Image: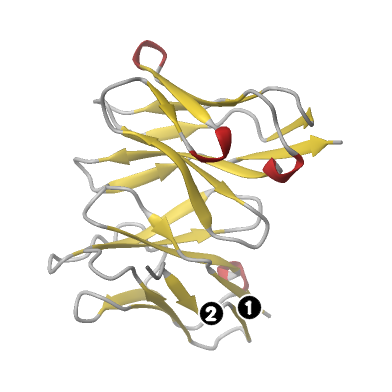
Amino acid sequence: GAGVSQSPSNKVTEKGKDVELRCDPISGHTALYWYRQSLGQGLEFLIYFQGNSAPDKSGLPSDRFSAERTGGSVSTLTIQRTQQEDSAVYLCASSLEGVETQYFGPGTRLLVL
Amino acid sequence: AQSVTQPDIHITVSEGASLELRCNYSYGATPYLFWYVQSPGQGLQLLLKYFSGDTLVQGIKGFEAEFKRSQSSFNLRKPSVHWSDAAEYFCAVGAYNFNKFYFGSGTKLNVKP
């Protein structure tokens, strides 16, 4: 079956602009995670959605970052007023439930000029 | 606090040689344990996982890992490395009471011909 997909694959934006990153999880997966991977770094947890529960936003680095998940499926990560330090690869992963095995998308590479 | 440590940032091995990548974790109970591989420009692919049972687990591409509770370790091994194994490897802990994953900072593997 189809895996996790993310769009766009690459995004170049100017400092101060807003960006939206999209994630389509595997069908039937109730859990969805967003991570940020900066150059040469590991994965930084951003936000977690599980079913209809309130999301765990504890990893969002500032109030410029927000995410939503519509209908328990597609998720959008929004970064407002982008800064150069936001440049990174943003990875989305889904799992059947909770901390069952995560399946990752290919990521969105964001460059803020 | 939960954490995952991969002490080796870079490792170089010759093709055909054996490989061991180290992973230590800090968690208050027996965690779910994972190894992922990331090839350049790609998302993360699951190599293997440990939830319970036999502490030696087999994965894809000829990899295996052994969970050692007494050492809080989950080291990844491969008896004979192939040039296509050159990638970055991430160890992760699934903390089921927090519904979060914690990733190590990764080990970059270089394979010499």
Q: Report in which chain the residue with disc 1 lies.
A: A
* For residue A9, side relative to residue A63 (left or right): right
Residue at point 63% right, 78% down? A112
Up-down relation of residue B78 to residue A56 (above or below) = above
* For residue B1, side relative to residue B106 (left or right): left
Q: Residues within 10 Å of mark 1 (few under 14, many from 20)?
A: some
Up-down relation of residue A97 to residue A64 (above or below) = above
From the image, tell me which residue sits under label 1.
A112
- Residues marked 1 and 2 touching at CB (< 8 Å): yes
Question: Which element is circle 2 on?
Answer: loop
Amino acid carrying label 1: it is Val
Residue at point 69% right, 26% down? B80
Report whether mark 1 lies on the same chain as mark 2: yes
Q: Quadrant of residue B49?
A: top left
Q: By what rule are the colours in the image chosen?
A: secondary structure
The x, y position of residue A62, in whole percent, is: 40, 67
Q: Is residue B85 visible?
A: yes
Closer-to-camera residue (A90/A98): A98
Closer-to-camera residue (A100/B106): A100
Residue at point 50% right, 83% down? A81
**Which quadrant is the N terminus of chain B positioned in?**
top left
The x, y position of residue B26, in whole percent, is: 37, 27
Amino acid carrying label 2: it is Thr
Q: Quadrant of residue B83?
A: top right
Instruction: Find the residue positioned furthest to the left.
Output: A52
Is tag 1's residue or tag 2's residue first in the polypeptide sequence? 2
Instruction: Find the residue positioned furthest to the top.
Output: B70
Q: Report in which chain the residue with disc 2 lies.
A: A
Q: Residues within 10 Å of mark 2 (few under 14, many from 20)?
A: many
Tell me the tag on residue A82. 2
